[in-house]
Amino acid sequence: MKMHRLLLIAAMTLPFAVACKQEEAAPVKAEAPPVAVPTTKDEAAWNAYLTDVVKRNADGALSVYAYTLPAADSEDFAGSYERQLGEAQTAMMRGGVEGTLLAFGSPDSTKSADLAIAALEKAAPDSMKGVRVLFIGDAADSARVEAAVKPSGATYKFVEAK
């Protein structure tokens, strides 16, 4: 009977031991180098850069919402701004879900900051606890965005686009 129990325990723990060994033996993937900040207003290059920054700062976020704009002098900038603003304001009015990351970025940091601030004005006080807001832009715009985030209860993070 005692031997039977020992064999049963050994049989039950063997899969766990094998799984641990497989995890240990798994090769470690090398992290890709960061995407460089574009030196032009090329929308595709900026989307690649912003996507890379968001991924590197997601830190286990359950969901990510990115509000990005094209360059301010691009065709239909005003339309893009209005669409993004409408989506962001609607999300802020609903309040935040813990584990969510909201990211704002653009080739035009000032316009991106304006978008974030206008959207966050719709958030009720303390309605975004557990939410993180990531602003990717110029240091000169960071304080304005951070001030807009504070009343919402969200956590603010800034990444300088340089």
Image (cartoon, helix red, strand yellow):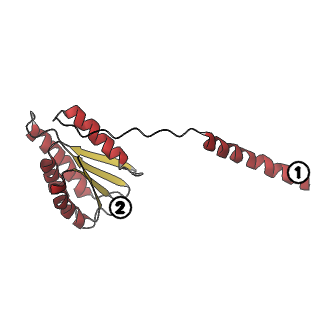
Q: Residue at position x 40%, y 38% from top?
A: 32
The residue labelled by disc 1 is 4
What's the mark number on residue 68? none
Q: Residue at position x 10%, y 38% from top?
A: 77
Q: Residue at position x 62%, y 40% from top?
A: 25
61 lies above or below 147:
above
Q: What whole-number distance in Å separates the C-alpha atoms at marks 1 and 2?
A: 50 Å
Viewer-nearest residue: 85 or 142: 142
153 lies above or below 41:
below
Q: Residue at position x 64%, y 41% from top?
A: 22
Task: Estimate the x, y position of residue 118 in percent, counting from the top left.
Answer: 14, 55
Q: Are marks 1 and 2 in contact (CB under 8 Å)?
A: no
The residue labelled by disc 2 is 130
The quarter of the picture where the N terminus appears is bottom right
- The kind of residue on which mark 1 rests is His
Q: Secondary structure at mark 2?
A: loop
